[in-house]
Amino acid sequence: MKLSEFDYNLPEELIAQKPVEPRDHSRLLVLDKEDGKISHHTFYDIIDFLNEGDVLVVNNSRVFPARLFGKRKDTGGKVEILLNKNIKDSEWEAIGKNLKLGTEIVFDNSKLEAKVIEKNDKISNIKFNIKEEFFFSEIEKIGHTPLPPYIKKNDTKQDKSDYQTVYAKPVGSTAAPTAGLHFTNELLKKIKDKGINIVEVTLHVGLGTFEPVEEENITEHQIHTEYYIVIPDQIDKIIDAKKEGRRIIAVGTTSTRVLEHLFHSNNRQLTTDNFLSGWTDIFIYPGYKFKCIDGLITNFHLPKSTLLMLVSAFAGKQNIDKAYKEAVDMKYRFFSYGDAMIII
């Protein structure tokens, strides 16, 4: 398929600059992927579209303040870096302007220091002087929330909580799994009380989620890799539900990628007694046959993005084209802080 087929016109004023308060008062577009029928609701109505016995799969990765400001140790010149993903121990992949191999960086009001040990185009590998177990506590003191580039405001303390799901646990994401931002603790309790199982997986979301596709033939695009972790009792609940014919509803494209990676790559590993972990670069676009999920809760995604391709694969491209046009016409709010849709 061609990249141009995944483009659409979006008025700039529909790009959400802040979340709705309370979270579950955002709008909800409901799309039936079988007949293309669309209806409009409020997000807290989502419980009406979930059945007893369903398994709701959420990505519990926690966003950390990955935007760091420092200065060159030799000249005192200002430096800004954006951490992308942990390579190993205290070594990180990062994006930063005017960084050269060997550049040493110090950070104000912190004992944290860093050195560029590898340089490749826009990406640098940076090694920090603090051990992994103490790294995030130091980052929390000096870091800034890495808001997406289409949110045109300075980050604030409020963004540290706004740009975080209420169920976030293990630290590791530089971008939020935004479909989960609509849930409140009260709504989650109501969902559980209805007899719906909530399963947690972890996918540490990197900046690659915003990386534009440039190849006109989308099959030539090399998608970003992200690290996932799933513990056995959680995957067992999904396996049991699949055997019993109960629905698996993924919250977000990140949860979807974890589940489809596991079920697509090697079913035998799903019965292991160890943690399931590794890197996934699964690229889902129209023509893909889904192995695990039966429903998807998601936000409205950027034109020409791999996320738009994924939802088009799940719902059918014509259905998504129609839904997005109707969302624009009805002035839904788009992207990370925007409204939501459920595809069932």
Image (cartoon, grey):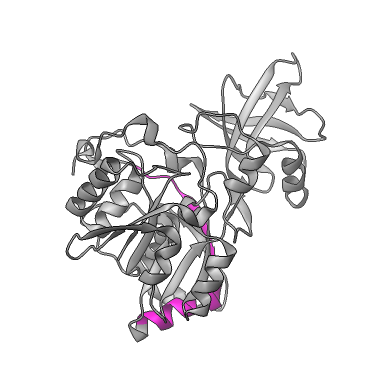
Stretch in magenta: 222-242
Q: Is residue 235 magenta?
A: yes
Residue 210 horizontal side relative to residue 39, left or right: right
Image point (24%, 41%), residue name:
6
Vertical placement of 246 versus 61: above or below? below
On the rendered structure, is 18 left or right of 307? Answer: right
Badge count = 0
Residue 276: tell me if it is visible: no
Please report the residue visible at 42 percent of the width from the left and 70 percent of the height from the top. Answer: 47
The image shows residue 182 at horizontal and vertical percentages of 49, 55
Quadrant in the picture for residue 342: bottom left
Image quadrant in which the N terminus is located = top left
Provide residue 22's location: percent of width, then percent of height. 55, 53
Which residue: 68% across, 39% down?
157
Residue 162 percent location from the top left of the image: 59, 47
State which quarter of the image contains the C terminus: bottom left
**Membership of 265 in magenta stretch:** no
Q: Which residue occupies 53% across, 45% down?
A: 175
Give whichever of 49, 133 is nearer the camera: 49
**Residue pushed farthest bottom?**
244
Can residue 98 be seen here? The reply is: yes
Q: Nearer the viewer, residue 18 or 92?
A: 18
Q: Position of residue 149 (x, y in %)?
A: 48, 32
Q: Is residue 47 left or right of residue 273?
A: left
Report whether 279 appears left or right of 300.
Answer: right
